[in-house]
Image (cartoon, rainbow, N blue to C red):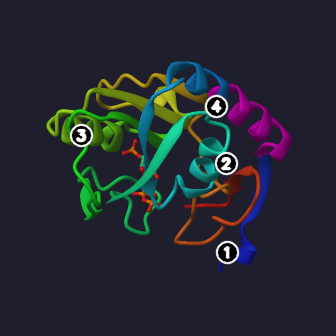
């Protein structure tokens, strides 16, 4: 039961908000006077995405891309599954990919390859969290919010077995086997 797990705050709401504004400013400079297709990678990045796009001062078009590799486990299956495709083509568009976390890097790697094959004008990647010690594949991320240790984290969109996405800060989960 999720209520039996102990959560310890790792990144506060205030720290998240400061970082989101900082990344938003950098993206506003980058896309000034341009149109950008901002892609929310479901489900985990929905909260970060919603906050981030409100900080981008440019013409933003929202798109949603569904991928899953953890399927209710705390370990990556190693196989990325597409669960929802984009609504419109991104060829010749400036594209911003918004992820919540890069852990093994398999999902980010898959997303970059999949989107690059659709020939956008530019592709910028952004992830709120990165676990450098867990990377299994090389993947470059343009904007990273926080580097965190190899701990299972939830909140601000990230889940454990579907729970805790609504917690407004990032927390470490104690007591997982
Ligand atoms: C999580 C997270 C990233 C991915 C990162 O998604 O949202 O997309 O894993 O892990 P990786 O770097 O090891 O590939 P998950 O499969 O849990 O789906 P969800 O976002 O719907 O919770």
Task: Tell me the tag on residue 115.
Answer: 3
- Closer to the chain start, of discs 3 and 4, is 4
- Closer to the chain start, of discs 4 and 2, is 4
Q: CA distance from mark 3 to mark 4?
A: 22 Å
Q: Nearer the viewer, residue 15 or 73?
A: 15
Q: Residue at x 47, y 61 (%)?
A: 43
Q: Residue at x 50, y 25 (%)?
A: 31
**Bounds of the magenta segment:** 10-23
Quarter that holds the C terminus: bottom right
- Closer to the chain start, of discs 3 and 1, is 1
Please give the residue where the numbered disc 1 appears in the rendered image.
2
Task: Tell me the tag on residue 24.
Answer: 4
Question: Could you say where residue 84 lies in the image, as x and y percent from the top left?
Answer: 29, 65
**Mark 3–mark 2 contact, CB under 8 Å?**
no
Q: Nearer the viewer, residue 31 or 113?
A: 31
Q: CA distance from mark 4 to mark 1?
A: 33 Å
Please give the residue where the numbered disc 2 appears in the rendered image.
51
Question: Could you say where residue 125 lies in the image, as x and y percent from the top left?
Answer: 42, 31
């Amino acid at each position: 039961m999720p209520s039996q797990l102990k959560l310890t705050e790792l990144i506060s709401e205030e720290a998240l908000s400061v970082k989101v504004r900082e990344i938003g400013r950098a993206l506003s400079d980058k896309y000034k006077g341009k149109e950008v297709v901002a892609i929310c990678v479901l489900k985990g990045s929905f909260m970060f995405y919603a906050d981030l796009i409100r900080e981008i001062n440019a013409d933003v078009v929202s798109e949603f891309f569904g991928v899953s590799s953890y399927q209710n486990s705390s370990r990556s299956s190693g196989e990325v599954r597409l669960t929802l495709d984009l609504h419109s083509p991104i060829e010749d568009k400036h594209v911003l990919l918004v992820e919540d976390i890069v852990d093994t890097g398999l999902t980010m790697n898959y997303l970059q390859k999949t989107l690059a094959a659709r020939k956008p004008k530019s592709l910028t990647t952004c992830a709120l969290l990165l676990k450098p010690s867990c990377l299994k594949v090389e993947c470059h991320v343009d904007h990273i919010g926080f580097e965190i240790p190899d701990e299972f984290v939830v909140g601000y969109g990230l889940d454990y077995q579907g729970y805790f996405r609504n917690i407004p800060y990032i927390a470490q989960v104690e007591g997982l086997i």
